[in-house]
Image (spheres, grey):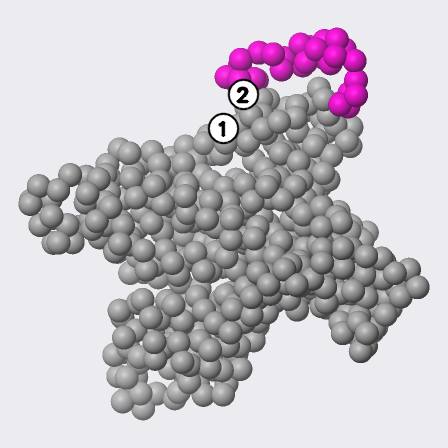
């Protein structure tokens, strides 16, 4: 309990720091909201007037206080390009993206764990070489390149899935899944490669340990040893890597959603950055960093659940 | 040396050397306009004796473009990793060497930066500064700094507690001498491994940035930009995307393989 309370306190502090950094990155670097609204060729007097009315001449601390106050009370401002309240926009886009985040993680976990275990069980044999080489190629290819190959193969040549677009799950689960599948697969393949490498190395270490030898000496079936005892010990570190990959996923999602024209959080972030919609950039940066941090907390808590040794410590 | 002579080591180092050689030599041998010269009568030609890797949508030779793109991509990646080393090494070293309050403050900052996905941070910095090659270097360099700082700090913490550091301190060495002569040389091996792996990630980040139009700008050639330009022609001319994609994949693969081997060489537990 104390651990969880400490973690919550640490999260509150990190969230505060995230907000300061988000505000700093978007405020200190060149380009401001007034220039974004009126354009670079606008009348300097009109620009100065708008800056004053938006409070951009106030000290940075005052501007930060106003922004964070708004964020805490639910007033996240309006998007300059979409002309709608940012909070509504973000909720809608997070819903869209959560489908491909969950799908890609499921694809990665379902494929990576058996592949990594297979490689570790057949260490230094062709199965290991095959699985490790496939994983190495997987981490070496950019996600968007996987995406292009998926579009080419599954959408253009085979015609099984739509090549781009988003379908709202509320309008039907099947169209939503068929639109989300290719982006999820493109994201999941890179993730799978990382997880396979981690599963293989963790399982290799565990399969050399004493308790595994004892299990074998007692005549337990190899399948029981590998899948019940060894994997149960390997799952913690693998989960930690999966948690760390949430950050990687939220970076890649920007490229993949843009490539597939899937109008989720990544696509929204790209539109905000491309059009320098500063209020929207601030909100998306803050939300994504907070989600990544919370995902790591969830993984840590799950780790406590799956590995009783950590609880005892 | 023996450890490099495994298939993985040989393939990895050969790929990296090949790409480095291309990046250094290609611009000296190939006139710059070869990569930008458009031949509208030879658009989207498949690989042939005249154009070994085919041509793109503007009739530009893909072999020349991919060879000249090597310099841009590798140069941005190398400069970005160098920048992250310049920023991350002192940050991690001070944190790990002095510990206590300085460590708490610096690492809290680093952890906060780590909450931002690397590509998102790089894209934001690049978008705010404006897309260009120097800005892409700054964006990727800053985004990679927290990782380097974390690793340097961990290693510095470990090395600072070693008896030889204690002995040097007892012999009268000041902090600067301790860091420069005893801690720094001993934290370098894992940092070199991390830098090699970071180089691979920086190439992917540059490709991602350029793919989204926030990195290298046309007409300069970079691999990410070439993949981006190929998107609309993939069903009629798949080689336009596959050639630069393969260049990225082979370079990153070579760096990852070299990184794995370097890790084995430097890690005493695997000896």
The kind of secondary structure element at disc 2 is helix
Main secondary structure along the magenta-highlighted residues: helix
Question: At x 65% / y 49%, what residue is drawn?
Answer: B209
Image quarter for residue B70?
bottom right
Q: Is residue A199 magenta?
A: no
Front in this rendered view, residue B118 or A163 = B118
Q: CA distance from mark 1 to mark 2?
A: 8 Å
Q: Is residue A158 left or right of residue A190?
A: right
The kind of secondary structure element at disc 1 is helix
Question: At x 36% / y 51%, what residue is drawn?
Answer: B151
Q: Do circles 1 and 2 both sit on a common chain?
A: yes
Front in this rendered view, residue A94 or B102 = B102
Q: Position of residue A39 (x, y in %)?
A: 77, 23
Q: Position of residue A2 (x, y in %)?
A: 30, 41
Q: Position of residue A6 (x, y in %)?
A: 34, 39
Q: Which residue is label 2 attached to? A: A64
């Amino acid at each position: 309990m104390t651990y969880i309370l400490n973690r919550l306190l640490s999260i509150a502090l990190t969230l505060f720091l995230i907000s300061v950094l988000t505000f700093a990155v978007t405020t200190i670097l060149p380009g401001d909201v007034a220039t974004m609204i009126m354009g670079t060729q606008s009348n300097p007097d009109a620009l100065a007037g708008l800056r004053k009315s938006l409070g951009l001449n106030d000290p940075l601390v005052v501007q930060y206080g106003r922004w964070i106050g708004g964020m805490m009370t639910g007033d996240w401002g309006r998007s300059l390009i979409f002309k709608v309240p940012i909070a509504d926009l973000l909720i809608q886009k997070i819903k869209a993206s959560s489908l491909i985040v969950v799908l890609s993680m499921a694809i990665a976990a379902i494929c990576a764990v058996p592949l990594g275990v297979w490689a570790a069980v057949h260490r230094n044999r062709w199965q290991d070489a095959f699985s490790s080489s496939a994983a190495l190629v997987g981490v070496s290819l950019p996600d968007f390149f996987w995406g292009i190959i998926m579009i080419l193969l599954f959408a253009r040549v085979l015609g099984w899935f739509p090549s781009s677009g988003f379908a709202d799950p509320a309008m039907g689960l099947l169209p939503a899944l068929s639109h989300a599948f290719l982006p999820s697969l493109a994201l999941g393949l890179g993730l799978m490669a990382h997880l396979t490498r981690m599963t293989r190395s963790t399982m290799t270490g565990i399969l050399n340990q004493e308790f595994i030898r004892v299990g074998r000496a007692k005549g337990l079936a190899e399948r029981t040893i590998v899948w019940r005892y060894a994997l149960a010990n390997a799952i913690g570190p693998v989960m930690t890597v999966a948690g760390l990959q949430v950050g990687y996923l939220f970076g890649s999602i920007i490229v993949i959603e843009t490539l597939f024209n899937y109008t989720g959080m990544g696509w929204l972030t790209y539109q905000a950055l491309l059009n320098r919609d500063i209020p929207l950039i601030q909100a998306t940066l803050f939300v994504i960093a907070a989600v990544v941090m919370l995902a790591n907390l969830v993984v840590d808590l799950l780790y406590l659940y799956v590995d009783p040794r950590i609880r005892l410590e | 040396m023996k450890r490099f002579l495994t298939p993985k080591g040989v393939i990895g180092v050969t790929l990296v050397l090949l790409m480095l050689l291309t990046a250094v030599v290609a611009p000296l041998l190939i006139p710059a306009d070869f990569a930008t010269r458009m031949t509208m009568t030879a658009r989207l030609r498949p690989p042939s004796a005249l154009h070994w890797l085919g041509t793109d949508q503007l009739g530009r030779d893909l072999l020349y473009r991919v060879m000249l793109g090597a310099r841009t991509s590798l140069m941005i990646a190398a400069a970005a990793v160098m920048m992250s080393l310049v920023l991350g090494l002192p940050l991690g070293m001070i944190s790990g060497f002095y510990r206590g309050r300085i460590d708490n403050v610096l690492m809290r900052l680093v952890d906060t930066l780590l909450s931002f996905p690397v590509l998102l941070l790089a894209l934001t910095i690049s978008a705010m500064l404006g897309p260009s090659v120097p800005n892409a270097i700054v964006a990727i360099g800053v985004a990679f700094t927290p990782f380097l700082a974390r690793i340097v700090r961990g290693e510095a913490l470990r090395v600072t507690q070693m008896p030889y550091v204690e002995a040097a301190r007892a012999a009268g060495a000041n902090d600067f001498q301790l860091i420069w002569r005893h801690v720094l040389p001993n934290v370098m091996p894992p940092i070199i491994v991390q830098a090699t792996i970071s180089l691979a990630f920086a190439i992917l980040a540059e490709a991602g940035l350029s793919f989204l139009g926030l990195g290298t700008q046309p007409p300069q050639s970079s691999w990410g930009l070439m993949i981006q330009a190929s998107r609309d022609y993939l069903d009629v001319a798949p080689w336009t995307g596959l050639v630069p994609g393969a260049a990225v994949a082979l370079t990153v693969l070579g760096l990852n393989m070299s990184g794995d081997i370097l890790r084995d060489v430097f890690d005493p537990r695997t000896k």
